[in-house]
Image (cartoon, grey):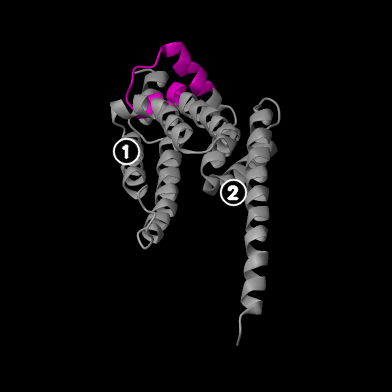
Amino acid sequence: MDALELFRLTHLGKRDVWAEAVALFVTAVDIIAASWILGALARADNVWVVPLTAVLLAVTGVAAGFYLGRPWARYALLITPGLLTLIGWMQWSEDARPVLLLAFLFFTGCALFAHRSVRNQLFFQRDVPRPALERYRARQQDNPMAHHAWHYGLAGLVVPLFAPLAVFCGAWGLREAKPPVGSAMRALGGLVLGSAVLLLWYHQGLELYIPLTRLLRDLPP
């Protein structure tokens, strides 16, 4: 057994960061949507509850299949953003359509990136051409923290929980990026993406925190 085959067997069938990101993102969406559904059940205008629940169950099924490494889920994940965009296009107003298009492009791009990822193909136990496997192995051995930073940074755009990992791995990868070790740009990219996500959520948190503190201050004793 050569070193490349040993490397392939080491990663074969082992879950990757994309499977974890999809599972975490859909779980967060399910929790938020469940709170909306529970609130809507107490109102009269709740006709949208049943179709929304059906869509959520379908998307959750695709995410669960992807997380568990089911072959059909790799292809279902590719068409899910398009189907959700089509449903939103028919149900929402025209003002929301530019946002729908941006979301479609972003999530479809992430799905394509995951689909073509050598690491994800190994997780789904697919045959990977030897040249592609060699390139992936070379990247992993050349400053792996930089590659982790880049992947966590991309995943952080979908699931913000990965952003701190991107910042940590990016800083570590930049520290290690000295000749002959390379991949400084990947480390920097992961650091920038992770920092941007953290800053975005920090400002969003402030926007929610300030009105909340004012509301609590104005409450009668």
Q: Amino acid at mark 1?
A: Ala
Q: Which residue is mark 2?
A: 164
Mark 2 secondary-structure assignment: helix
Q: Quadrant of residue 96?
A: top right
Q: Which residue is mark 1?
A: 58
Between disc 1 and disc 2, the foreground one is: 1
Q: Residue at x 41, y 19 (%)?
A: 4
Q: Residue at x 62, y 46 (%)?
A: 168
Q: Magenta region's main secondary structure?
A: helix
Write the start and end of the magenta stretch as one range.
115-138
Q: Amino acid at mark 2?
A: Pro
- x%, y% of residue 141? 54, 27
Height in image: 215 above or below 89? below
Q: Nearer the viewer, residue 73 or 34?
A: 34
| Marks 1 and 2, the one that precedes in the sequence | 1
With 35 as the anchor, is 204 left or right in this view?
right
- x%, y% of residue 145? 58, 37
- x%, y% of residue 161? 53, 49
Quarter of the image containing the C terminus? bottom right
With 92 as the anchor, is 122 left or right in this view?
left
Question: For mark 2, does the 10 Å Cα neighbourhood hold few (<14), some (14 to 19), or many (20 or more) residues?
Answer: some
Q: Is residue 182 magenta?
A: no
Height in image: 137 above or below 215? above
